[in-house]
Amino acid sequence: MSSALTDLFPHPIVQAPMAGGVSVPALAAAVSEAGGPGFPAAGYKPADGLYQEIKQLRSLTSRPFGVNLFLPQPEHAESGAVEVYAHQLAGEVSWYDTELGDPDSGRDDGYDAKLAVLLDNPVPVVSFHFGVPRRDVLDALRRAGTVTLVTATTAEEALAVERAGADAVIVQGVEAGGHQGTHRDVRENDGTGVGLLALLAQVRETVGLPLVAAGGLMRGGQIAAVLAAGASAAQLGTAFLVTPESGAPAVHKQALTNPLFVRTELTRAFSGRPARGLVNRFLREHGPYAPAAYPEVHHLTAPLRRAAAKAGDAQGMALWAGQGHRLARELPAGRLVEVLADELAAARTALSSWGGAR
């Protein structure tokens, strides 16, 4: 990986930004202090909220950290389907005694205002999800001293990232928890996601940029595997979700290792975009009927998800989780980084010993 990125942190372990209140400053600071960059998520919060979180994070650590932005989304072709889906959710409205949200609450997530914050108050790293920023945006961040990363879920998307001028690609396999960072959200791509190791090989032969691997990674041995496959660092989200510093609700943390939740699935049920979560009642009942309409469906279901979380009802929440969720360990975030780094070193030593034995 380019020294511009590796010089920032000693361990090739990146804490994935998890929007919705999970990636709080305390979590990001703990990871950064342990030697792997922490990432607060700017998604779903106002620009002033992002500014305040950056200030708080800087008061907690002097180590490098990153910020993640969602790209504005184009108009979708299923506007009528959103109204139909709202009727589908009538039973949820009655059950949780709340109203549905306004699906027209905004499509750009305050992108320009948040970008202005990051240009006025530069941070070491900025990553992007749901598309590719314009070249002038990436150039402006580079002039401000910021390293830029952009998520890709296919080799073609990675090539678009390289052409736009980003510093590195986050290669997101289908195993990843939460939203897939696809650049173009269309139904015909549903179910076509590629596993991380296969995707890394494809991207490695397509672009010359440094790669950060993401998707189902929970152990240091897995990090060693993706580094051997061509990545320069690994990004982990679900592994950090259960840490005490995480802002995830307790019921979400407990669900990751609860035998009641045996598998994950990609669904549009909660947001209108494919996202991987634990299979619960809401996902089973509404996933097959959810339209391809992000962020309209996200806005629509937001009050339901908040009500379910307040009631401690895991069956109505978006329980985002990667495929490795059963391997979650309830360790402090800084300690988890240390354990992962030790496991990585042990895996590398074992591989080296095996090679020498031959």
Image (cartoon, grey):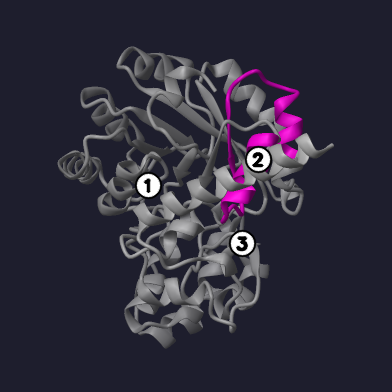
- Magenta stretch: includes residue 108: no
Q: Position of residue 92 (x, y in %)?
A: 47, 81
Q: Position of residue 335 (x, y in %)?
A: 38, 56
- Magenta stretch: includes residue 211: yes
Residue that protrudes farthest toward the bottom in the picture: 95
Label 2 sits on residue: 226
Q: Residues within 10 Å of mark 1 (few under 14, many from 20)?
A: many
User: Which SS class for mark 2?
Assistant: helix
| Mark number displayed over residue 294 | none
Q: Quadrant of the C terminus?
A: top right
| Mark number displayed over residue 324 | 3
- Residue drawn at x 75%, y 54% as measured from the top left: 191
Tell me which amino acid carries mark 1: Gly
Tell me which amino acid carries mark 3: Gly
Could one spot residue 40 in this view of the protein? Answer: yes
Is the residue under label 2 in contact with that under label 3 (CB below 8 Å)?
no
- 161 is higher (above) or lower (below) than 323: above
- Residue drawn at x 59%, y 73% as measured from the top left: 283
Label 1 sits on residue: 43
Residue that protrudes farthest toward the right in the picture: 358
Which mark is nearer the camera, 1 or 3?
3
- 264 is higher (above) or lower (below) than 52: below
Q: Quadrant of the N terminus?
A: top right
The magenta region covers 199-228
How far apart marks 1 and 3 lie (CA) works out to 24 Å
Would you identify the image quadrant in which residue 140 lies?
Answer: top left
Tell me which amino acid carries mark 2: Val
Decide if residue 357 is on the left or right side of residue 333: right
